[in-house]
Image: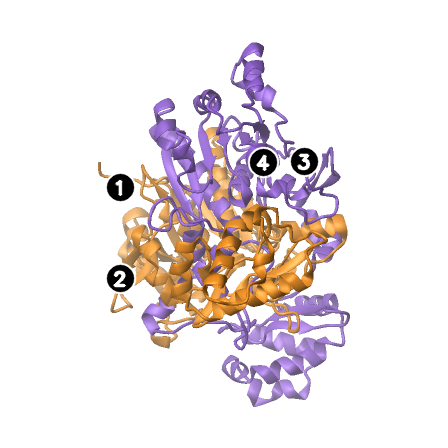
Chain colours: A purple, B orange
């Protein structure tokens, strides 16, 4: 199977920020032809992000985060607010199988290019809108970011130490999970259309998807009136279960013991010291009751070794354990991720060669096809003339009217 | 117009997963795939995961299990026994997907690896969800939510600086990996319907999770700088600002950001601080759109003073006041919801997000999230309770595979089903 999974599928992509960009990326990396519509008059968040020194204040094309999020797409610069842009949009809808967008709900309606309009041009179009709260309801028009999903879904309430304020990882969650659901809905809708001939309008909400990750706690509250709250690294069905200090500066290894077989293996690894025979640690229930002490004793042992030594000793004995890896460990050394080619080196004219994320779900026969992320308006002329069939004169006229800015 | 079809109605999946792979099948089942859990006789060991109904550890009372196996059927079948495997192979001829989360090479070791399955049914899609992936130096490692969260770089950025790094509250790694697995499965399905050929989908939870902090990865790759755990402060670019705040009766999420993304909220915040009569260092900024936190002339003292005023404002008000008044003012602050707040949320109610589901074990129906997305032509809803172990045995073994009562009771006696 030489062709990527979505070869032949055409996507009109208004996606931006994280959710929209990543939704389009899933489709593009798998072979769909994705035309990313963007405008320098309303520039994408990731094109202004200056978290690394190489990124300047005014060049939209020197942001590595933007390129991470937008591989394999074609770039069309189009000012949607210019009245003459609508003729281009109409042609794009005629061309497309799928429309992806994540503007604040109501935006496309104001521009006169929402689903109802698209449907009149292409009755079997598949269109997906995603937003923080969904397209309907009293909060629909409110703006939301990744943290909105964390706060609303209970993630924040349950992340942290029991005696401290909630905290959260410096890594997006809903912004990355939602695009998987979005792309899944789109591909399933393509399959449905293949069988039934019908298109579909799909409405996704980041908050709603995040809440699914907390369903057990929701049931626990309803059935048992029990509030699950912050509990550090501990969980109810494993002990020890935590991060233990190792040799070096701020180095840690996690260990997770779920049953008595793993506990006995763990005890052997640490040399069966006398305390492991103590009745306080004899079974899971006792270990849970004496977890402070247990963790202190384990920390004394782990502190004598490096984090990787602890991990290998435990794993060799069949005990789940993993180093708290930093990005240096991951990018420079992790042999497993390297074997999976989790990053693909791609050359960027402004930034040089660096790794771009590949799909983490590996189809073993159908390969992904990952190309560079487009610079602002890189394919404007190609899209207008070669794909949409504009004449050179028409293209130049629209360009003079600042449609492509 | 009555709508009753789902996007993937008419397909069947065999779901062999433990807790690492529940959600993939849950999603497919909501999309209409007939999803049959194949449990060892006696039930899936993951039925022992708490919390439990009424706090009692019982085989059908795991709320964790109930949460993530909605809309599935259940049969019991021992894959460890030759007769069980023979039955399983019959089922493979009549299904479209197999989802599994065993350790890599386990299915091979019992003669049910992909190469065997594809001979039985070349259209089969085998989705394998593991901690590190099917191949490679860590593929034999034992993983879990905690271990994979550590190995993927998530934990190194979570927690208070003066304490060990932290796991996230919900099982985010399992959840995200299963969303990725469901996408891979449907993608492979789309290919199969074109070419007639199935394939294996290899999902590594570590690889899925490591792609969340992709910006931290870039900060290391380009600047050799590490983003570390910073408690209620978030590191964006050169500056760090608060994003979690204490209020009168709980906590608030509100990102203090510069530039256009933060402008509306910052103006609203400054106005509210004034209205509350708190000394207001936010007044020093006249053009919030141009306020660049990374700029040299924005002093740390000014940012600290502004955050102190914001902190004071939040501490004077309740979650409800901050959410409602904040909406009117355009502040866009969000309450840190507990489980009760989530169930009471008016937006979710207005969207008909919840569905009441009765199950034999619960006396009263429990409320579950009803959908992963909405669609105008199809219904892709969570609708029925997670199954009791083996409740579908007679349908599959008697009605479909045409086994006699005698054969069935014989297999029950010998521990096959």
Which of the labelled discs sits on residue B358, or is there none?
2
Res B23 seen here:
yes
Label 1 belongs to which residue?
B4
Which of the labelled discs sits on residue A61, or is there none?
3
Chain of the residue on which disc 1 is drawn: B
> Foreground residue, B132 or B3?
B3
Give the image location of residue B321, x and y in percent: 39, 64
Instruction: Tell me the distance, in whole angstroms, between the alpha carbons under discs 3 and 2.
Output: 54 Å
Q: Earlier in the sequence, mark 1 or mark 2?
A: 1
Give the image location of residue A368, x and y in percent: 60, 36
| Picture residue at 47% right of the left edge, 31% below the top | B196
Instruction: Tell me the distance, in whole angstroms, between the alpha carbons under discs 1 and 3.
Output: 47 Å
Chain of the residue on which disc 2 is drawn: B
Do the residues bearing badges 1 and 3 touch, measured as CB atoms within 8 Å? no
- Quadrant (top left/top right/bottom left/bottom right) for the N terminus of chain A: top right
Instruction: Tell me the distance, in whole angstroms, between the alpha carbons under discs 1 and 2.
Output: 21 Å
| Picture residue at 71% right of the left edge, 66% below the top | A312
Give the image location of residue A23, x and y in percent: 51, 40
């Amino acid at each position: 199977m030489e062709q990527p999974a979505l070869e032949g599928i055409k996507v009109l992509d208004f996606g931006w920020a994280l959710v929209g960009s990543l939704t389009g990326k899933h489709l593009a990396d798998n072979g769909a032809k994705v035309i990313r519509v963007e405008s320098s008059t309303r520039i994408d968040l990731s094109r202004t992000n200056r978290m690394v020194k190489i990124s300047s204040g005014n060049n939209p094309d020197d942001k590595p985060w933007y390129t991470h999020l937008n591989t394999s797409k074609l770039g069309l610069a189009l000012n949607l607010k210019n009245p003459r842009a609508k003729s281009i949009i109409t042609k794009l809808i005629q061309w497309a199988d799928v429309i992806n967008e994540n503007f604040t709900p109501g935006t496309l309606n104001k521009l006169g290019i929402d689903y109802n309009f698209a449907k009149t041009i292409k009755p079997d179009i598949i269109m997906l809108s995603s937003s923080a709260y969904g397209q309907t309801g009293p909060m629909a028009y409110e703006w939301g970011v990744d943290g909105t999903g964390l706060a609303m879904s209970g993630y924040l309430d349950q992340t942290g130490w029991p005696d401290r304020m909630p905290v959260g990882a410096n890594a997006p969650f809903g912004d990355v999970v939602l695009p998987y659901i979005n792309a899944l809905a789109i591909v399933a809708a393509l399959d449905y259309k293949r069988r039934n001939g019908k298109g579909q309008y799909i409405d996704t909400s980041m908050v709603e998807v995040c809440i699914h990750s907390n369903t057990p706690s929701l049931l626990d509250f309803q059935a048992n009136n029990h509030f699950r709250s912050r509990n550090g690294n501990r969980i109810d069905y494993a002990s020890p279960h935590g991060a233990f200090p190792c040799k070096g500066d701020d180095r840690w290894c996690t260990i997770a013991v779920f049953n008595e077989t793993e506990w006995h293996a763990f005890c052997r690894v640490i040399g069966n010291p006398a305390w492991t025979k103590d009745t306080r640690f004899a079974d899971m229930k006792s270990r849970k009751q004496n977890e402070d002490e247990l963790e202190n004793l384990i920390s004394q042992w782990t502190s004598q070794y490096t984090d990787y030594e602890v991990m290998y000793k435990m794993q060799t004995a069949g005990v789940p354990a993993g180093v708290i890896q930093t990005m240096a460990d991951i990018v420079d050394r992790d042999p497993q991720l390297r074997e999976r080619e989790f990053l693909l080196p791609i050359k960027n004219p402004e930034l040089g060669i660096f790794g771009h994320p590949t799909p983490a779900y590996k189809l073993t026969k159908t390969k992904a096809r990952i190309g560079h992320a487009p610079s602002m308006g890189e394919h404007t002329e190609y899209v207008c003339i070669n794909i949409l069939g504009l004449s050179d004169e028409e293209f130049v006229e629209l360009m003079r009217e600042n449609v492509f800015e | 117009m009555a709508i009753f079809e789902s996007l993937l109605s008419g397909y069947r999946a065999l779901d062999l997963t433990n807790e690492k792979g529940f959600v993939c099948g849950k999603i497919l089942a909501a999309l209409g795939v007939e999803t049959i859990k194949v449990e060892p006789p006696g039930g899936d060991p993951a039925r022992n995961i708490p919390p439990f109904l009424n706090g009692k550890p019982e085989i059908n009372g795991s709320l964790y299990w109930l949460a993530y196996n909605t809309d599935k059927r259940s049969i019991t079948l021992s894959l460890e026994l030759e007769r069980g495997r023979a039955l399983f192979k019959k089922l493979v001829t009549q299904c479209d997907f197999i989802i599994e989360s065993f350790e890599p090479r386990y299915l091979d070791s019992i003669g049910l690896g992909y190469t065997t399955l594809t001979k039985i049914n070349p259209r089969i899609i085998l989705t394998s969800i593991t901690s590190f992936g099917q191949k490679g130096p860590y593929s034999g490692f034992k993983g879990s939510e905690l271990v994979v969260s550590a190995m993927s770089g998530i934990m190194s950025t979570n927690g208070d600086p003066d304490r060990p790094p932290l796991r996230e509250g919900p099982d985010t790694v399992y959840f995200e990996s299963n969303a990725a697995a469901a996408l891979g499965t449907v993608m492979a399905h789309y290919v199969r319907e074109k070419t007639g050929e199935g394939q294996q989908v290899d999902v590594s939870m570590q690889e899925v999770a490591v792609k969340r902090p992709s910006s931290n990865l870039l900060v290391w790759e380009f600047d050799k700088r590490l983003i570390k755990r910073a408690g209620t402060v978030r590191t964006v670019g050169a500056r760090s600002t608060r994003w979690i705040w204490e209020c009168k009766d709980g906590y608030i999420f509100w990102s203090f950001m510069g530039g256009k993304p933060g402008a509306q909220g910052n103006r609203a915040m400054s106005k509210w601080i004034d209205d509350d009569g708190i000394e207001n260092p936010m007044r020093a900024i006249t053009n919030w759109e141009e306020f660049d936190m990374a700029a040299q002339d924005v002093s740390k003292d000014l940012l600290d003073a502004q955050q102190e005023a914001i902190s004071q404002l939040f501490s004077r008000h309740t979650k409800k006041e901050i959410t409602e008044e904040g909406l009117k003012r355009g502040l866009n602050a969000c309450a840190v919801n507990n489980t009760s707040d989530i169930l009471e949320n008016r937006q979710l109610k207005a969207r008909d997000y919840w569905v009441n589901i009765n199950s034999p074990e619960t006396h009263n129906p429990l409320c579950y999230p009803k959908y992963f997305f909405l669609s105008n032509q199809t219904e892709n809803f969570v609708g029925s309770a997670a199954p009791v172990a083996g409740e579908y045995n007679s349908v599959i073994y008697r009605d479909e595979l045409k086994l006699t009562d005698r054969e069935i009771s014989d297999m029950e006696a010998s521990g096959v089903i």
